[in-house]
Amino acid sequence: MRFRTYKNTDLTVSEVGFGLWTISTGWWGSFTEGEATALMHKAFDLGVTLFDAADTYGNGLSEELIAKAFPNQRDEIVIATKVGYDFVHFGEARGRGQREIPQDFSPEAITCATDAALKRLKTDRIDLLQLHNIRMEQVNDDALWKTLHKLKSEGKVQYYGIALGPAIGWLYEGVNSIRERELTSVQHIYNMLEQHPGRAFHETASEAAKDTMFLIRVTHSSGMLEGKYTPDTKFPPTDHRSHRPRSWLLNGIKKVEQLRFLETADRTLGQAALQWLLADDRVASTLPNIYNEEQLVEFAKGPDTAPLTSDDMAKIEALYSDNFGVEEEPPKFKGTMELPQETAVA
């Protein structure tokens, strides 16, 4: 495993992290507590130190799993979690697609949510606290950011940032947060098949000379870039991928076939997908969706495989620019994906 340190911090994370949403929400299958903690232990043994949770994942379950899996390794792991959804009053989101529950980013709610997370995690500090799927209202709310600063000054939070979603959109929120706030980290969707709006976030950080670095989720485009789907692939009814249109599967397979050149005797396509992300030094860590041990081992070893060459990167860029030669309807974004002209990102 290799490690990276967030700019101007002492926060060092493994280049491959473990996102607990796969083992605590039911969207990727059901896991017993024993199965979940065993997978986390295996990740730790492979050098993974970053564990990314959220208070709403399983109504606190993801944070409880970290406490149960690592009761004596607090100083050996990095705990990231998220707050903002009011699951205490409304319960965890369930149902078709990505239906959301109400959020509450008031100073009182964020303070209470942080304290509750600390209790579930059985720790005195959260290494990285992230505002979960903020909107422009929160970007502009000075009281919210003062609350985060206060939590940091009290030692409850070491560093803070944002996580963007739930859809792939939210360009406006990401760009303005990076420009206007001092963020250690921004978590967002980004992969070889889905580069917008993630690329704009990275470019904004560079253009604004900000130290903000990035945690990348959906690194494999919901499993597509693992290269194992076929036209006959079926997902269980409880799996969130079962809600995708069939065109997503068929068009994705066509795109992936054009990326097979990245596979070598010593590097899988799934590992190449991670290397593509890690070629960007603004990326602090990657959070592939992990749901079995075989896949965990493959991803954890990804950073140690051969990096992509400049020719590889150029070919990927050319394919992406032409949408891999696939004609399809443009993606539909839920978020604010257009900026006023004066703040537009090239």
Image: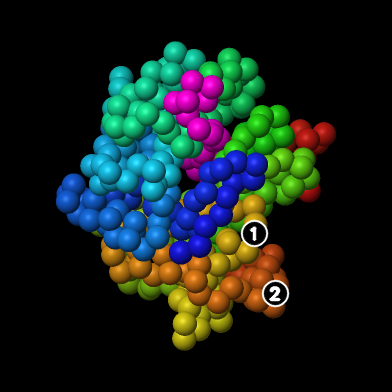
Q: Amino acid at mark 1?
A: Asp
Q: Is residue 166 magenta?
A: yes
- For the point 57% across and 50% down, which residue is it? 5
**x, y (%) of residue 123?**
34, 32
Q: Secondary structure at mark 1?
A: loop
| Highlighted magenta segment, given as a residue range | 152-169
* Mark 2 vs mark 1, CA separation in Å: 12 Å
- For the point 50% across and 75% down, which residue is it? 305
- For the point 40% across and 60% down, which residue is it? 47
Q: Is residue 341 left or right of residue 14?
A: right
Q: Pick whichever, 64 or 173, lies toward us.
A: 64
Assess disc 2: are there few (<14), some (14-19) or many (≥20) residues with their C-alpha within 10 Å of its C-alpha: few
Report whether residue 264 is seen: yes
Q: Secondary structure at mark 2?
A: helix
**x, y (%) of residue 126?**
43, 33
Do the residues bearing badges 2 and 1 touch, measured as CB atoms within 8 Å?
no
Q: What residue does disc 1 label?
A: 280
Q: What residue does disc 2 label?
A: 310
Sequence-wise first label, 2 or 1: 1
Q: Residue 294: which quarter of the image?
A: bottom left
Q: Is residue 143 shown above or below 97?
A: above
Q: Amino acid at mark 2?
A: Ser
Report whether residue 239 is seen: no
Residue positioned most to the right? 342
Q: Is residue 11 left or right of residue 102?
A: right
Q: Is residue 63 magenta?
A: no
**x, y (%) of residue 205?**
71, 44
- For the point 59% across and 53% down, which residue is it? 283
Q: Is residue 94 shown above or below 87?
A: below
